[in-house]
Every structure is written in structure tokens, then in C-alpha cells.
Amino acid sequence: MPKVVILKTGTTYPALREVFGDFDSWFVTRLAPELNIHVVDVTVDDLPGQPEDWDGIVITGSPAMVSDREHWSEQTASWLAHAIKAEVPVLGVCYGHQLLAHAVGGEVGFHPRGRETGTHQVELLDSALDDPLFKGLPRQFPAQLTHRQSVLRLPENAVLLGRNEFEAHQAFRLGPCAWGVQFHPEFSSEVMRAYLKVQAPDLEKEGLDADALLAGVNDAPEASSLLDRFSQIVMNR
């Protein structure tokens, strides 16, 4: 069975964890059952050997901020730069997406327009039409999002694959098989609603309409399919 490591970069709100489990369990549920999946919490544990020891690598989201450059985060970034060079399949999500970009010279920081949260459309570019992970998906599809930091500048040689009106860098690829996605393919619509309910007091302070965002939550099957698509890429290699 192909070996995949999930690099856990944080933990969700306690109220969500009690009901839905934590970040890593959401990925385990949606990745293919044929994979031999290991979880390493890089915020407290040692990095899992060498990237070449793994057939695939997934990096979760986090409440941390890449721009804080915490020691564990910087160590993980260096490890991921090695993984990209070694052409191990990598999928970074939200914090993982930003950390991938930071690892090879991109710029990460707070989005100038603040927070993006809820279900929003992602637009794929022509570059995604023959991309191994995205090809065959519709040019627009809904995705679950919640973030305040973004990739402000892509690394040199990154291929931009997706964007939307708020976020210029929703998806990119580095080399042949390392991808970052700002959105959350591991989120169910129930998890997205739970996030918005917890965030509601802050959303109102930020001038966002929490009720409208809640009402706008929909399923996002195309976005979620990326975890099965990534699984297939790992297994085919």
C-alpha cells in the first residue's frame, strides 16, 4: 500500500473537534482507503524521516500564521522544499498551501481585504486544463474557504491554476506534482457551517454578514474530489 503522511499543522476549534474530530481525521476520511496513511503533528513531533520515504505528502490547515515563522513551521518548510525537489507528490491545503509557497520563495501575509470564509466559487485557468490534479473539472466550482492569510506572491516557476474575485492564488503547482490549494477539499458543508457559527461574532465585527454566509453554504463535491484525485496520482506512481 502506498505510504502517505499527513503533516498536521494545528488543531481546530474545540467545539468542532468534539463533534467532527480534528483536521487529520477529515483528510483520512476523504483520501482513498487503499493508502497507508500516517499522521505526524509537526507542531510537537519530529519530521517524519526524509520526504523520499513517502509516496505522498498532505499538509493540513492551521490556526497558526505562516508569517509568524515559528520554528516548527520553518523546519517543515525546509523539509517540503526537499520534497518538491525530490518530486514526491504533495498537496498543501490552506496553511499547507501557504507554507509550500513560502518554502520556495513565495510571499505569504495577511490578505489586504481581510477574511474569506464560507462557500465561494473557484475559477480554473487554462493552465488547469491539462494539469494532472485538476483536468476534467468544470471551469468554475464551489469550494469551502476560511482564511485571513494568503499567498501574496507566488514562487518563481509556480504555475497558477485557479483564482476567484477575492483571492488571486486559489491553486498552484510547483514542479510536476506539488500542489497548493487555498480552499478546503476536506471540509464538508456541515463543518463549514460549524466554522461560520463559531466565527460569527468576529465576522460581524469585521463587517461580514454571518447569516448570509451561513445561508450560502453549499456542498462542494468538485473541490472535495481533489483528495481522491490526489490519492489516484499517488497510487499510479
Image (tube, grey):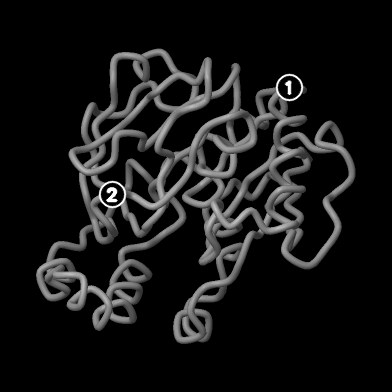
Dot 1: within a 10 Å radius of its alpha carbon, few (fewer than 14), some, or many (20 or more) residues?
few
User: Counting residues from the N terminus, which is met first, the one under dot 1 or under dot 2?
Assistant: 1
* Depth order, front residue of 128/68: 68
The disc at residue 177 is: none
Dot 2: within a 10 Å radius of its alpha carbon, few (fewer than 14), some, or many (20 or more) residues?
few
Q: Position of residue 130 (x, y in %)?
A: 41, 13
Q: Residue furthest right?
A: 49
Cα distance in 3D space between marks 1 and 2:
31 Å
* Depth order, front residue of 64/94: 64
* Depth order, front residue of 171/237: 171
Q: Which quadrant: the N terminus?
A: top right
On the image, which quarter does residue 124 sit in? top left
In the rendered view, tell whether residue 179 sits above or below residue 112: above
Q: Which quadrant: the C terminus?
A: top right
The disc at residue 85 is: 1
**Which residue, given by chain and number where applicable, does mark 2 sit on?**
112
In terms of secondary structure, where does tag 2 sit? loop
The residue drawn where x is 86% and y is 57% is 46
